[in-house]
Amino acid sequence: MISAQNYFRRLLILKNHPEQMPAIKEELYELLHELPAESQKMIEKIVEDKKVDAADAEEIKKFIYREKQPGGYEIRLLFDIHDHTYGQENDPSWEALFLDETTRYFSANAGEKIKLPLAKAAMLFDQVKTTIKNVGMMSEVELILIKNLIEITGDLIFMNKSDSNFLLALYEEILKDSTIDFNEIEILREMVCQDIPPILEDLELLFEINLAIMNKPRDDMWRVLFIESVSSYMINKPSEIDIKKAHWLEAKLEGTIEKVQCLTPDEIALLCALKDQTQDFPVGLDFYLTKYSQ
């Protein structure tokens, strides 16, 4: 689930992007308002037998429409039930309900082919990533949802084939124009910052993007996201870097050097930030900083 803390932090960051502020504030209520307590009881009842029958599907539909129109939290409820009952002999009406309501929610007000609003895009990435974590793969119905949204919005995600890795699809979307803008950075922030510390899979993606956009136009918040995310992973305790993680970072830096014969400006800024935060900066990392920051 996208955390309220991340969104409120975003509001502070948006002082440099005032044109985005009204839309984000409006989306906050949409995504973070709370369901009544009986929602959890309904989930427990439905997933008790690990499947959704026709009666369950009808009950879910009535519940999500109790306020006439499903909102962000109700859509999260559908994803939650989806993950709990994935792979079971569910009634076909459940898959139809899930697909219809999620497609309608994410594509609402898309009168012409446009990208999803920032908060909804971040929410979708978050929910699919949660499914991959829970069940080990992106489900068939989620893949249909993504394809539906591509058709409606035009260029939500670039996917070459049906089994494309979700992170790879995001990577390709960001790098189509060899730049990274504010909205793309914010979607990445939601993906990376939901795990504290971030997981290696997400950090590998950041390093790939960082190398690909070297010397290309980018929003200033890219460097902030890159440094904060990698530092959060590297520093286990106040002022201490684990030696295994130091070796991992050395390998990433060496990979950059092999490809472009230098470190990127953001990698040098990362090393400076890590050195400032630690009392005993690893010798290997200090070597790269000294040699390539001249």
Image (cartoon, rainbow, N blue to C red):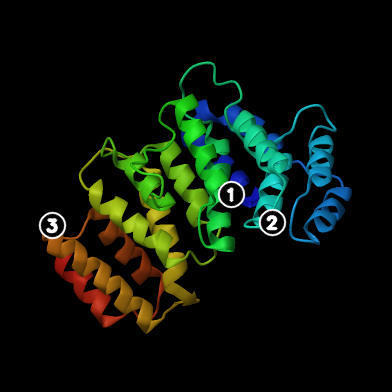
Q: Earlier in the sequence, mark 1 or mark 2?
A: 2
Classify residue 206 as left or right of residue 145: left
Judging by the rendered image, the residue that carries numbered circle 2 is: 85
**For the residues bearing labels 3 and 1, Cβ distance under 8 angstroms:** no
Amino acid marked by disc 2:
Thr
Q: Nearer the viewer, mark 3 or mark 2?
A: 2
Who comes first in sequence, dot 3 or dot 1?
A: 1
Check the picture and name the quadrant holding the C terminus: bottom left
| Nearer-the-camera pick, 216 or 144 | 144
Q: Position of residue 20 (x, y in %)?
A: 52, 29
Instruction: Report whether residue 32 is seen.
Output: no
Residue at the image point whose x is 44% and y is 59% from the top: 228
- Element under disc 3: helix
Q: Residue at x 53, y 47 (%)?
A: 140
The answer, for residue 212, to whether it is visible in the render is yes
Count neighbours of disc 3 (C-alpha within 10 A) and say few if under 14, some if 14 to 19, many if 20 or more: few
Name the residue nearer the viewer: 220 or 55.
Answer: 55
**Which residue does the numbered mark 1 point to in the structure image?**
127
